[in-house]
Amino acid sequence: MIMRAIVLLTVGLVLESASLGAQAPSAPAGNAENGKKLFVERACWQCHGLAAHGGGIAGPRLAGRVPAWPAFSRYVRRPTEEMIPYTAKMLGDSELADIYAWLRSIPAPPAVSSIPQLNRK
Amino acid sequence: MAIDANAHVNRRGFLKGAAAGAAGAAALTMPGVAPGEASAQAPAQASPAPLTPEQASRNLAAETAPLADEADVQTVTDPGSDFMVDVLKKLDFEYIAANPASSFRGLHESFINYGGNKSPEWITCSHEQAAVNLANGYYAVAGKPMAVITFAPSGLHHAMMGIFGAFSGHTPTYILVANILDGKERRPAFDWGPHSVVDPAVAVRDMVKWDDTPLSLQHFAESAVRAYKMAMTEPRGPVVLVVDATLQENPAGDRSKLRIPRLTLTSPPAGDPNAVAEVARLLVAAENPLIIAGDVARDEEGMRLLVQLAETLQAPVQGGGRGMPNQHPFSGGGNVRTADVILALNEDGLYGRLNRYRDQQVRSSTPLIKPDAKVLSISAYDLYMKGNYQNVERFQEVTMSIAADPQATLPSLIEACRKLITADRRRTMEERGKRLAAASAEALERARLECTYGWDASPISLQRLALEVYDVIKDKDWASVGGNGGRLWNVDKFYRTMGAVNGGGIGGSLPIAIGGALAHRKYGRLCVRFQPDGDMLYVNTALWTATHHRIPMLFLMHNNRAYHQEVMHLQRMANRRQRGMALASAGLPGSSITDPNIDFAQMARSMGAYAEGPISNPKDLRPAILRAVERVEKGEVALLDTLTQPR
């Protein structure tokens, strides 16, 4: 059940991203360094993992697939699936922008082909 | 004869001295205690007051007087518990798990001396919750019940969570509960209250399939066989048999009048042929059929049948537990939103599968399936349900419901489907199968890609931990006894995983894993367990049971230093109420397991296991796993305390 909810959440985010991303206003400038700190302080890591790599059934990966800002910010404020809502009282707009900036700044992971454990049959 | 009063001690003094002497002797010769380890000293005895000649004379007269009649009955040659052991041997139990207790001292002695501690062999547990869950885990691998013995009231109360787990997981654990029903047989100060209950089984009657309190040995024999039969009849479940201490300790009497009935197990019920034919018709005609499977397979044959059904229909299977190979092209695909015919097999969480439920301030639930989708259910769980403890979800409407055992029904269903598949339908199905196989291959590649994120993170990502372990064990005959290796572990055999075994809550899965490893031991399989830290803290002395009984297995700690599920729940509450954010990073009181951090490696070593850790650098994983696996292959228990991401 939880797994299905997470899959739906991910799908929802991607769809919103796809539908709104093209004409969407760009994200406000954010401080990625502060965003990394806030990702921990405001408990995002609890479900998404400290590296935003995804927490299995708890929360989808955000690293490498951050939705467009309008979809992202709208979803964080009023999630349509299982995510915990973050109102502006809990997480200000500029703080959310900082987190967004950090998520966008996460470097790409190593390639699958470079990890022997993922390639041995 | 003259009596030197000062040279004698009185009776009480003699007994004290004898006790102290015995304790001293025991300290020197106690098995397993090295000289110097037994450091406790008996307190110095005060010199007894000298007796007057009259007192000494009275004492001597009392000590040499003829014994009263009842004192003559001090031995027994054929106790009732010997017969009970014969009964339990006939039921072919391989093991019996227990924390010792005086209420079953008769049976305990009979198992060891009369029964030779074989079939069943006694497995020593440090807690009844561990004993029952060990048996739950054993069944999941062995496919037959393991016995547990405990006593009323406290042992049974300790065991309750494990029994609840057996109930929830449809596990036929066989539980003996010792009691002393007859008040005149109860020892003052010991047995009134701590070892006696009027009706012990009432505490768990709402979660066992059947219980009985035999009052004679013949009654015991018949109820013991009936209990086994009831436990193993589908749907399976735990049973309780109360064994009276007096019945254990009194003579069996004339053995020629006692008979142990033959055990004949009940065949699982197959579905009604007409209903099965209709299910086949709907499945073959469907454009997007979907199979949703709960705990369907009892054995390798069940797995073969589920795969055969999926391949006959070229239909995806969601769930299926260990009944469906996780890398089969039809495993995990399909979508309830687009399915036109959904076949649910032993799925007691069907509502959750077919509806979207949101845990927000106001709960909401909406159907996921198409309004005209046909939902067909074949379930043995429709044959048995309890009112107080419930393991069903909200009521799910279905189009057809067949009360039957899915594994027993699959052969006729597969055959009925084959007869209906025309050349035209076969072409359509094969096209569907190709699409499913392509989607499955893509999903496997996505799973590989997901592992790369957080690959070098510290604490270690769970994906990396799983992959590092699998890379070491994949060419060995491995079995997971708990925890999920994920899609990249090729679960190609029925015994690779444990199925729907349930421990009744946190704390149950450690002994379940050990019970599973116990059942795997005779096959020489390499057993691996991902062990959450919170669960480990309940009955961690089960580790000692594993080392003591030489049950080789590898533990990888999922040590996130928190009851992290509850951390997330508290965060949900705080966000919903818009307060408490400062707690998020500092650790939530009541949910964090820090200050001090627990040294799980030290804990494991204290119970005789090989252990390393804490390990927080993912680069240190592989060499540590190689060292640990080498130990396990030599027959040891090994534990690696790995600090992991929360999820």
Image (spheres, grey):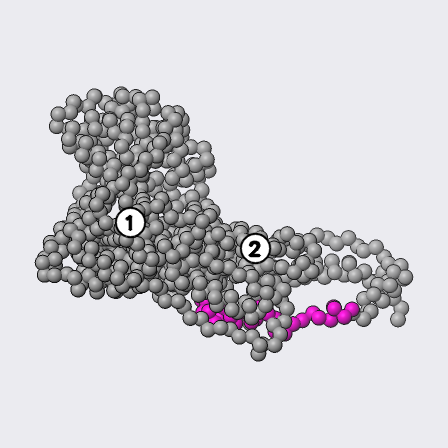
Judging by the rendered image, the residue that carries numbered circle 1 is B398
Which of the 4 image quadrants contains residue A92?
A: top left
Kindly tell me whether residue B80 is visible in this rendering: yes
For disc 1, the neighbor class at 10 Å (few under 14, some 14 to 19, many from 20) is some
Q: Disc number at residue B98?
A: none
- Residue A83, quarter of picture: top left
Residue type highlighted by circle 2: Pro
For this view, does B333 lie left or right of residue B36?
left
x and y, in percent, of residue B443 in the image: 19, 47
- Residue at 28% across, 28% down: A78
Q: Is residue B555 above or below residue A26?
A: below
Q: Secondary structure at mark 2?
A: helix
Q: Which chain is mark 2 on? A: B
Up-down relation of residue B459 to residue B303 (above or below): above
Q: Position of residue B622 (x, y in %)?
A: 30, 50
Relative to B56, is B483 above or below? above
Task: Tell me the chain of label 1.
Answer: B
Residue at left 64%, top 52%? B193
Q: Is residue B88 magenta?
A: yes
